[in-house]
């Protein structure tokens, strides 16, 4: 696994603002546990709400989902960009369609409670979103 530490990616003030906004806008009881730690994934509906309520979180998501940051990562990790495709099918910030909302809700459920037909629809929709975002050759 390759990684790179980016010094001062966000300032101390930005970090404190993100923490304060998360405390202000998130209900920690609704966050899923992952190895006894609370987890807020970018595909989570609470992240969508947080980005729409907090200018600081929206700015961070715009920054990390930008083409500039994607290219920066490829360059600094010394990766050839040909095998990679930047797809933002779960990180929409402003508006999401009813289908995308259903996709997010289903994607955040435990697999044990999802029936086969819903799972099949989820996988089809996910493939559709990937194909929809691929650039034409």
Image (cartoon, grey):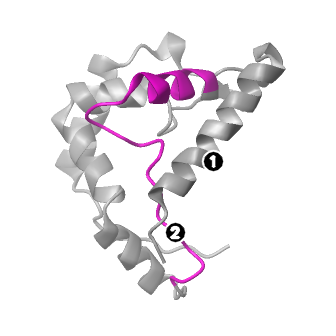
Q: Can I make out residue 20 in this image?
A: no
* Displayed quadrant of residue 67: bottom left
Q: Which mark is residue 113?
A: none
User: In the image shown, does 130 or 6 lie closer to the viewer?
Assistant: 130
Label 1 to label 2: alpha-carbon separation = 14 Å
Compared with 49, 61 (above or below) is: below
Where's residue 105, x and y in %? 55, 21
Residue at the front extreme, as displayed = 137
- Name the image quarter holding residue 93: top left
Q: Can residue 58 be seen in this view?
A: yes
Against 137, residue 14 (above or below) is above
Within-10-Å neighbours for mark 2: few <14, some 14–19, many 20+: few
Q: Which residue is drawn at 38% across and 77% down?
A: 71
Report how many numbered discs are placed on residues in the image.
2
Q: Mark 2 points at which residue?
A: 85
In this picture, is 77 found above or below 95?
below
Quick check: marks 1 and 2 in contact, CB under 8 Å? no
The disc placed on residue 127 is 1
Residue 31 drawn above or below residue 77: above
Across and down, in percent, residue 49 comes to: 33, 24
- Image quarter of the N terminus: bottom right
Can you give x and y, in whole percent of width and height, for residue 111 in the image? 78, 24
Disc 2 element? loop
Query: 10 Å neighbourhood of mark 1: few (<14), some, or many (≥20)?
Result: few
In the image, is 86 to the left or to the right of 116?
A: left
In the picture, measured across the screen, residue 40 lies left or right of residue 71, that is: right
Q: Give the magenta range.
A: 81-106
Asked if residue 16 is among those painted magenta in the image, a careful observer would answer no
- Residue 26 x, y percent position in the rendering: 37, 19
């Amino acid at each position: 696994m390759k990684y790179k530490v980016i010094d001062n990616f966000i300032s101390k003030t930005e970090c404190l603002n993100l923490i304060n906004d998360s405390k202000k806008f998130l209900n920690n009881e609704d966050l899923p546990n992952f190895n006894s730690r609370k987890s807020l994934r970018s595909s989570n509906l609470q992240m969508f709400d947080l980005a729409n309520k907090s200018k600081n979180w929206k700015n961070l998501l715009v920054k990390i989902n930008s083409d500039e940051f994607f290219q920066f990562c490829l360059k600094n990790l010394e990766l050839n960009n040909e095998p990679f495709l930047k797809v933002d099918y779960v990180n929409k910030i402003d508006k999401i369609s009813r289908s995308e909302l259903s996709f997010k809700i289903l994607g955040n459920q435990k697999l044990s409670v999802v029936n086969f037909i819903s799972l099949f629809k989820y996988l089809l929709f996910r493939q559709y979103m990937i194909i929809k975002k691929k650039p034409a050759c």
